[in-house]
Image: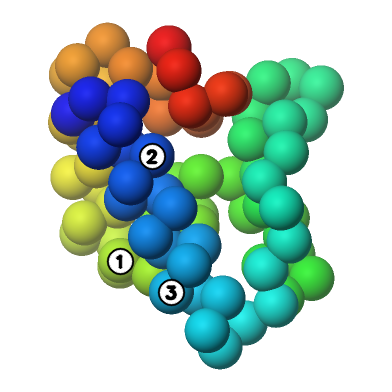
């Protein structure tokens, strides 16, 4: 999975979740983990993707991401 494909999955999840939930802006924490506020909770990428796409697809994204050498905790969207 390329960085662009990963970012597309992540941003589509944010966009769709934003239709029914309060969504903040993604930002990077001190440890390098990107998080986004969803309904008052700070969620890392994986949880954002899982919340919208479901556990099975989120796990598939994680596996494809780790297999391609990409970082699952995207920092700037570019590895």
Instruction: Determine whether label 3 and label 1 are within 8 Å by CB.
Output: no
Residue found at x 58% / y 23%: 75
Determine crowd level at label 3: few under 14, some 14-19, many 20+ residues with C-alpha closer than 10 A: few
Q: Residue 74 — which label?
A: none
The numbered mark, 1 or 2, whose residue comes first in the sequence reads 2
Residue found at x 74% / y 20%: 31
Quadrant in the picture for the N terminus? top left
Say which quarter of the image contains residue 63: top left
- Secondary element type, mark 1: helix
Q: Which residue is mark 1?
A: 53
Q: Residue 16 — which label?
A: 3
Most foreground residue, 14 or 31: 14
The numbered mark, 3 or 1, whose residue comes first in the sequence reads 3
In the rendered view, tell whether residue 75 sits above or below residue 53.
above
Residue 23 in percent (x, y) is at: 67, 68
Quadrant in the picture for the C terminus? top left
- Secondary element type, mark 3: helix
Q: Which residue is mark 2?
A: 7
Can residue 51 be spotted in the picture?
Answer: no
Residue 51 in percent (x, y) is at: 44, 68
Q: Nearer the viewer, mark 3 or mark 1?
A: 3
Disc 1/disc 2 C-alpha distance (Å)? 14 Å
In the rendered view, tell whether residue 75 sits above or below residue 6.
above
């Amino acid at each position: 999975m390329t960085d662009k494909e990963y970012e597309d999955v992540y941003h589509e999840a944010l966009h769709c979740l934003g239709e029914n939930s309060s969504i903040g802006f993604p930002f990077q924490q001190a440890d390098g983990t990107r998080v986004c506020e969803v309904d008052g909770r700070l969620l890392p990428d994986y949880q954002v993707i899982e919340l919208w796409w479901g556990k099975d697809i989120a796990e598939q994204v994680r596996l494809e991401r780790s297999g391609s050498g990409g970082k699952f905790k995207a920092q700037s969207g570019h590895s």
